[in-house]
Image (cartoon, helix red, strand yellow):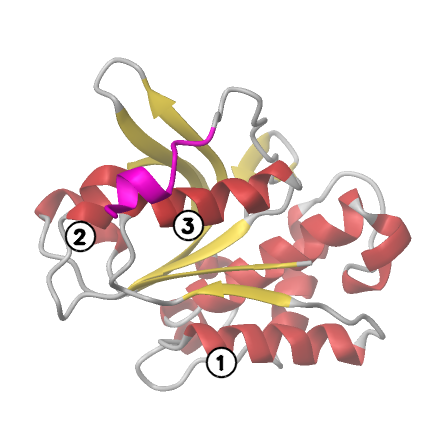
Amino acid sequence: MSGLEKFTVPSLDHLQEIQLYIYDEDKISYGGNQYWFPKKFHQLSGCGPIAAANITAYLAINFDDKYMPLYPYKGNINKKEFLLHMIEVRKYVVPGWRGLTSVHKFADNTLAYASEKGISLVPHILEDDTVNIMEAVQFISQALEQRLPVAILVLTHPIKELKEYVWHWMTITHLKLNPADNKFYITTSSYGERREVNFDLLWNNRRKKDHIKLAYFT
């Protein structure tokens, strides 16, 4: 049985984009930016901690009955408070000298941060590089249907158009099937900006040595 037979295309029309707006006077960012870290090394290796900071802040604000302690600030997210959150999260979500290249370490570190705040999170991880795109789409859509953002790690990739997303963590906030080209697109937070990425191009053009990992938390 092929992947297309086993996994039907989920209806994505009902999915609403998760909002990750961060306000700084008259400027608005879409999620955190690793270059906000005050230390240079933290800037260069900060995409993993930023994904964790985005997700934990979002959970705390949007599901405050369950996750409020994950982000101690109220109201709209502003850059000053989010920077403090980033610095706090990075004490637990610590990259190595080559960055944070393990989705399990990312999940374990995020759980350690949550545990310190008295919150128990459950990680959901897609790490199998052999799965077809429909399984990945199903995994992402299951999270977004619950209004939960998804962390994505792209290590290496051969497509030049995607080079800015290589060796990089992002936060997925939306998924759609574009009727114009019948391709899946993910909306992500990357470097504090809203980016649309051709997921078909990303997922279906990997080599055996390329790795893409996904994780979300409940």
Q: Is residue 173 left or right of residue 197?
A: right
Decide: is 29 above or below 59: above
* Membership of 171 in magenta stretch: no
Q: In this view, which residue lies farthest toward the top?
A: 180
Mark seen at residue 105: 1
Mark seen at residue 163: 2
Query: Which amino acid does the dot numbered 1 rest on?
Result: Lys
Please, what secondary structure does the residue beneath circle 3 have? loop
Question: Are discs 3 and 1 less than 8 Å apart at CB?
Answer: no
Reading the image, the residue beneath label 3 is: 191
Q: Name the image quarter holding residue 156.
A: bottom left
Is the C terminus in the top left, top right, bottom left or bottom right quadrant?
bottom right
Query: Which amino acid does the dot numbered 2 rest on?
Result: Lys
Single out the mark in the foreground, 1 or 2.
Answer: 1
Q: Residues within 10 Å of mark 2 (few under 14, many from 20)?
A: few
Q: Is residue 113 left or right of residue 123?
A: right
State the separation of the CA atoms marked 3 and 1. 21 Å
Q: Nearer the viewer, residue 127 or 48?
A: 127
Q: In this view, which residue lies farthest toward the front?
A: 1
State the separation of the CA atoms marked 1 and 2. 24 Å
Single out the mark in the foreground, 3 or 1.
Answer: 1
Query: Which amino acid does the dot numbered 3 rest on?
Result: Tyr
Please, what secondary structure does the residue beneath circle 1 have? helix
